[in-house]
Amino acid sequence: MRKALLATALLSSLASAEPTIIPLPKEMKEGQGSFPVSPETGIRYDAALDGITKLFAADLKERTGQEPKTVREELRIMLPSEIRLDLDNSLDLKPGGYKLEVTPKGVTVIGKDVAGAWYGTRSILQMLPAKGTDAWTDKAGAPVPVVSITDEPRFVWRGMHLDVGRHFFPAEDIKKFIDWLAFHKLNTFHWHLSEDQGWRIEIKKYPKLTEVGAFRDSSPPYGNRNSDDGKRYGGFYTQEQIKDIVAYAAARQITIVPEIDMPGHMAAAIAAYPEFGNSDIPGYAPKVIGRWGVHPYTLAPTEETFRFVDDVLTELCALFPSQYIHIGGDEAPKDQWEKSPRVKELMKKEGLKDGHDVQSYFIKRVEKMLEKKGRKLVGWDEIREGGLSPNATVMSWRGEGGGIASAKEGHDVVMASNSHLYFDHYQGVAKDELAKGEQFEAIGGFLPISKVYSYDPVPKALSPAEAKHVLGVQAQLWTEYMKDWYKVEYMAFPRVAALSEVAWTPVERKDYAGFRGRLDGILKHYDAAGVKHGDPLDPPKRETKDGSTITTSLGAYQDHWPEFAYDGKPGTFFWADRALKADDHVTLKFRAAVSGKAKVVTGGPASQNGDKLAGGVLEASSDGSQWTQVAEFKDGSAEGALPAGTTGLRIRVTKPQENWLIIHEITVE
Ligand code: ACM
């Protein structure tokens, strides 16, 4: 009997979920039992960890209701229950690495450096039960599971971006955001501080940047992006607020990389100081923009403007100690430069042949300014246009191409691809999101958390030596469709959790099912703290809607499985992984004989509209060997009647094509 009980206990402990911890550590060995954290639990700490000890003590107080006692390591004061925070820079770990031992008797964190010790405290907080849950009322204390962890980050740049130009968020919200980034061991907050629709940072030398540039007359309302609400909108951060936030982030081991986007996305600044725009073109009338999208106002590449840029960067560098300064560089239309006599003159003088050359000239000038200030330039991948400045770091957002090319040329890159890392895209099926209310509108796209999780920041196209230039990974939050803070949280979380595992965990340790299990515990932490997170949408199952089977001569691109062509779901589709040859096929074997009208639609949403079937036929069979044509594809679609007793439906390519193939859905009715 005892034996049986023991076996059951052992089994249930083996089956128990992994501790709640995201990102998953590099090495983690689970044991038996737990260490109870109670109001008696104190912290013994290395003097160099004074700052993070105070923060960790505040975190524990928030949960236990009592300020924990903290004692310096060298003092011989006994604590009845102890968490020890220590440092050992001889640990054979990368910067940010740490060891964490939890036994029933105590907890020890040893950081390779201060950041490492901080990450150790984040792991403890995550493994504790969520604040306010029953475990906290247990007299013995709240349990941290016994575990032995050796951990270090995969990448040095683990970034999250936030656009405060389209919508402005108060300093307190920014701090909350930083807390939750830190909770997942992210270390870079990319703060997008200027936009066509608003300039958000006080610059003492140019007060009109905020007096004029921080306010717009109107914005599009939710649900109708092509209209105007006619309401004045704006806000900005004072330099005092910025300093406070920078220090707040630094204490939490987060570097803030500020972005002033130039030479495009500058309409608000140009509205404030029209002399820095292309004022010599016909119809010049800059204003702070009240619609989304890309706008033509760009800075003029004049000496006067470069002095302005230099002045702004001087104040920026005084506020932000970050080694990297982001100068944007994206989506700068060349129209105004092409019309400007001044720019034409400059092009002649400098031998610039087109707008791309002007952009490159502009960015190179800015890089020199930053180098004089001892900083490094990072910009969106358009800074490649016309030639990259010598020491620039490239943030690859238009897919991976800019990142791959730059890394091959020896430039450092941060992967920020809009395919997997744009958190302004829908996390659920658009129509389900919109059913919750028009305030759930997103810019578009479909980025379920599983897709974020699937991302590998090191593109296969890079050799190991080239891959060393990948500093890391970053997700973006563009806020056109995020007027209020709850919406930012809704779009950011829990996808930030997936991002953190992409950025931190060794690729061979990644496991979506395990992540999903651990995420449930993380969601409880969010809920306890009132974070208005979205719902994680699990990846669609690789199955047809009724057990019919699909075979094909084609491979599947990423996880766009053939079964998705017949799963009845609007958000999924089959995507072949190559150009088509004659007689390539996709063949559906029905679970039971069918008859009626069959319809096949190929070609995807706008971003994939090339991948239609140009030449092909739809064929039916009742025995799987004799096939009869029932329709021919026209403009990517085919529709035909299936005779009674049809057991198979085949899409057969009749004309080779360069484009790949998307089959959105096969229907029979
Ligand atoms: C960007 O999304 N324009 C960087």
Image: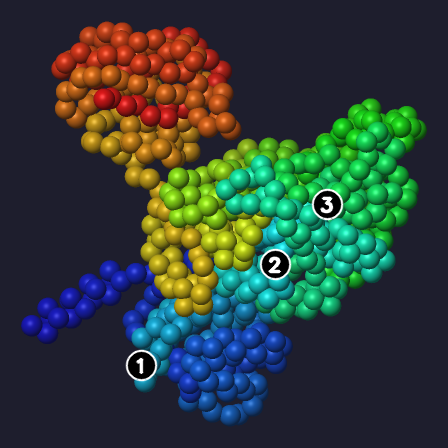
Q: Is residue 78 above or below residue 101?
A: below
The foreground one among 316 and 275 is 275
The foreground one among 99 and 403 is 403
Work out whether mark 2 precedes mark 1 in sequence or the reverse, and give the earlier one: 1
**Mark 1: few/some/many CA within 10 Å (<14, 14-19, 20+):** few
Does ligand 1 reach within 8 Å of label 1's beta carbon? no
Amino acid marked by disc 1: Asp
Q: How far across and down, in percent of the image, does residue 407 sit?
A: 64, 38
Taking 331 as reference, is 520 left or right? left
Q: Is residue 254 above or below residue 195?
A: below
**Mark 3: few/some/many CA within 10 Å (<14, 14-19, 20+):** many
Amino acid marked by disc 2: Phe
Between the residue at mark 1 and the residue at mark 3, the CA separation in whole angstroms equals 56 Å
- On the image, which quarter does residue 648 sit in? top left
**What residue is shown at x 81% (from left), y 54% (from top)?**
208
- Labels 1, 3: front one: 3
Tag on residue 485?
none
The answer to whether one can see residue 415 in this image is no
**What residue is shown at x 47% (from left), y 54% (from top)?**
490
Q: Which residue is mark 3?
A: 288
Q: Which residue is mark 2?
A: 169
The answer to whether one can see residue 206 in this image is yes
Q: How far across and down, in percent of the image, does residue 147 sit?
A: 37, 68
**What residue is shown at x 90% (from left), y 44% (from top)?**
304
**Mark 2: few/some/many CA within 10 Å (<14, 14-19, 20+):** many
Q: Secondary structure at mark 1?
A: loop
* Quarter of the figure that contains the N terminus: bottom left
- Labels 2, 3: front one: 3
Q: How far across and down, in percent of the image, does residue 591 sit?
A: 17, 26
**What residue is shown at x 24% (from left), y 65% (from top)?**
13
